[in-house]
Image (spheres, helix red, strand yellow):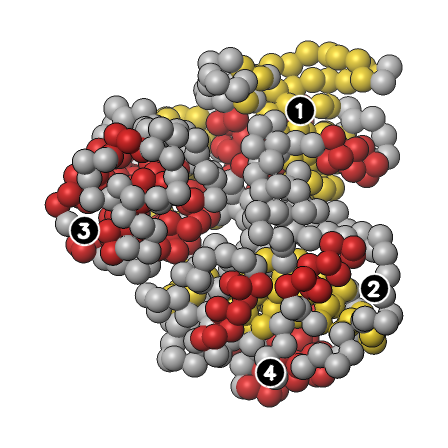
Amino acid sequence: MLILALKPGHDGAIAAVRDGKLLFSLEAEKDSGRRYTDLTVSTVLAAAELCDEIPDVVALGGWYRRGSIDRRIGAGYEGDAIQRDLRSIFGKKVRYFSSSHERSHLMMALGMAPESSAELRTVLVWEGYTGAFYLVDDRLEVVDKIPVLSQPGVRYASPFAIADPGYPDDSTDQRFEDSGKLMALAAFADPADADPGTVAAVDRLMRPDAVLPLPKSAFRDTPLHNAGLTSATAKSAAALISHRIFETFRETAERRLPAGTPLHISGGCGLNCDWNGLWRQSAHFSSVFVPPCTNDSGSAIGTAIDAMFHETGRFTLDWDVYSGLPFDTDTTPDPDRWSARPLDPARLAEALSDGRVVAWVQGRWEIGPRALGHRSLLAEPFDPRTKDRLNAIKAREDYRPIAPVCRAEDVSSLFDSDFPDPHMLYFRRVRGRELGAVTHVDGTARVQTVTSEQEPTLHRLLSAFAGRHGAGVLCNTSLNFNGRGFINRMSDLVDYCEARGVDDMVVDDVWYSRPGSR
């Protein structure tokens, strides 16, 4: 059975599942599309080209029409609504399925999690609008839904817009990129640093009856208003709201949920590595699972899982994080400007040691927003100036941290906790002071762990680097134009590297470098 699922609205995506296996998940922002963009015609056509037959089931994720969450697309945004009927596509009768956006997150978390014999599981869906726990039995019936706090994602991002002098006073537009930037700022302060006026502003944002986003002008009477993004006020507000939101959910979990269930997390707040680590440290849950595409980029997958469950009774998905499109070699780098040679991990490790930045492309792109060694910029991890250089290449704020990629066998010697994290979803503390380029201001790093079985080519490079430095660890940040998704074609890659001063590109097993580059 072939299921083709579509996610409308921002973070648009299309995914295909055949007989329980994920064939692909294509996010519209990838291949240098605008970040968070709606599903595009070109993405749909790319998916159609990958399908070798008309699907048996077309599944539409529920959404809402512009201007009102009550104007439904498909099964709508909230609730547990399901729609099923027969429709005709290119002359073939296919089964149509739609379930709510809320259910797409619920089913993504359940279907992508490792198989479990637990009689009960807890799912936490926290995203822009929904903030609730779901207690689910082994038949996938929701035994209990426990609403905690509406709009946790919108609340979390709001202090960033309020403090930003460039954000208009009369605007209520939500900037999806603000949450990640606020997570970086929160590390610069402690919640106790907030002054009474900032505490009052955060109290207002945390009111249960608040309907957000409020106009920024409503906060003119607070010290947070236009305080500046790198001000002490903005940093303390970021730390405080991060603490308050997590504690609200933690207290509810410990009061309302049975202890000892596995916790599955879905929604954009699942990208908050600080919160994920706190859930992992909690003694209330037996385990924690977060999908790599926990935000809306994975909602098409969640809807496909929901359709599969309703058609077959099966919900466990066989998936791989590298399920995007293969790299498009739409041109050949100009041999007058680029020389090509076979990839030699030892020589590339030497170049990285000498301070070179490498654009690194392998196979199919990653699903979800994190670069996991298939569309990455790699660099040495020791010199703090490397972080500044990478942020300059990426044309982003200098307070943003750079993450490390590390061989699994080196994790315990470099960081305070040793557990696999191939999808870069948790913070851990850095041991020592050697890793200056990847250590955030609070002494943490968001580490991607790599084994030879998972990523043999990247692991060989890390091992070659370890031969020179004693540990296999590098800077790893996403390969993309500012405000765009991952680069996925040679013409864009060449333009990017030549414009941003990157002199080395590796595409699968070929290493391109600019002659005379240092």
Q: Amino acid at mark 2?
A: Pro
**Residue marked by disc 3:** 194
Q: Are marks 4 and 3 in contact (CB under 8 Å)?
A: no
Sequence-first tag of 2 and 4: 2
Confirm whether residue 251 shows in the render.
no
Q: Kindly indicate the quadrant of the structure image that contains residue 476.
A: bottom right
Question: In terms of depth relative to the viewer, which is nearer, 71 or 265?
Answer: 71
Q: Residues within 10 Å of mark 1 (few under 14, many from 20)?
A: many
Sequence-first tag of 4 and 3: 3
Q: Is residue 436 toward the left or the right of residue 245 in the image?
A: right
Sequence-first tag of 1 and 2: 1
Sequence-first tag of 3 and 1: 1
Q: Secondary structure at mark 4?
A: helix
Q: Secondary structure at mark 3?
A: loop
Sequence-first tag of 2 and 3: 3
Question: In terms of depth relative to the viewer, which is nearer, 3 or 434?
Answer: 434
Q: Are marks 1 and 2 in contact (CB under 8 Å)?
A: no
Q: Position of residue 455 (x, y in %)?
A: 67, 65
**Residue marked by disc 1:** 59
**Residue marked by disc 4:** 353
Q: Secondary structure at mark 1?
A: strand
Confirm whether residue 231 shows in the render.
yes
Question: In terms of depth relative to the viewer, which is nearer, 184 or 23?
Answer: 184
Q: Nearer the viewer, mark 2 or mark 3?
A: 2
Question: In terms of depth relative to the viewer, which is nearer, 38 or 393?
Answer: 393
| Cα gap from disc 3 to disc 1, whole angstroms | 47 Å
| Cα gap from disc 2 to disc 3, whole angstroms | 52 Å
Q: Are marks 2 and 4 in contact (CB under 8 Å)?
A: no
Q: Nearer the viewer, mark 1 or mark 4?
A: 4
**Residue marked by disc 2:** 333
